[in-house]
Amino acid sequence: MTKASPFRLLLIDDDPADVLFFREALEDISPEVEFHHVADGQQALNLLLQGVESARKSHPHLILVDINMPVLGGHAFLQQTKAHPTLRSIPVLMLSTSDQADDIQRAYQGQVNGYLVKPSQYSEYRQLVLTLLEYWRGTVRLPPVEYTTP
């Protein structure tokens, strides 16, 4: 990650309260992160797959996706993302209220890069965002995302 390339994060979630918690925590911890939000998986795919040049500029370094959403849910989004030659290298984390073993198993079978249970308190959300940023922005090295046609 270079200074010329800010860390880009995409949150896919239809719950306004969860989006607000996440956004406020992110702005409090690291306001320079380029944050994008959409309410469902189809909107996210549209954003990621728009024209060649604009897609390259908007590809996030990390995607967080809820499971249950209208139009295209988290599992279907994950399946389509991991099947796409360009998008498959972008890390995708499930962020859900579900702590059910079958949801977790299905996510990992779909090649999710991590499964997180949504916190219920702002202080816990803040700690989650801090931990995510420390790991995904500060510790791991992510591959560059180059746009190729499927």
Image (cartoon, rainbow, N blue to C red):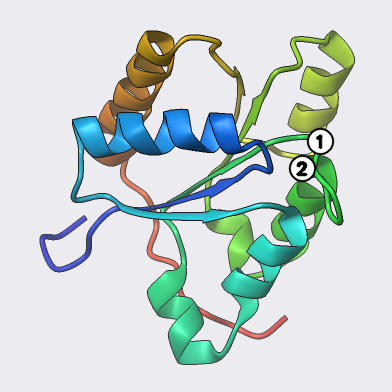
Q: What residue does disc 1 label?
A: 68
Q: What residue does disc 2 label?
A: 74
Q: Could you say which is closer to the camera, residue 109 or residue 52?
A: 52
Q: Amino acid at mark 2?
A: Gly
Give the image quarter of residue 97. Answer: top right
Q: Amino acid at mark 1?
A: Asn
| In this rendering, position of residue 20 left or right of residue 92 | left
> Residue sitting at 22 percent across and 31 percent down?
28
> Residue sitting at 21 percent across and 30 percent down?
29
**Contact (CB < 8 A) between labels 1 and 2?**
yes
Give the image quarter of residue 140. Answer: top left
| In this rendering, position of residue 71 left or right of residue 82 | right
Measured Cα–Cα span from mark 1 to mark 2: 6 Å
Q: Secondary structure at mark 1?
A: loop
**Front of the two marks 1 and 2:** 1
Q: Is residue 96 above or below residue 112?
A: above
Q: Could you tell me which quadrant the C terminus lies in?
A: bottom right
Tell me where residue 45 appears, x and y as whole percent.
69, 66
Q: Secondary structure at mark 2?
A: helix
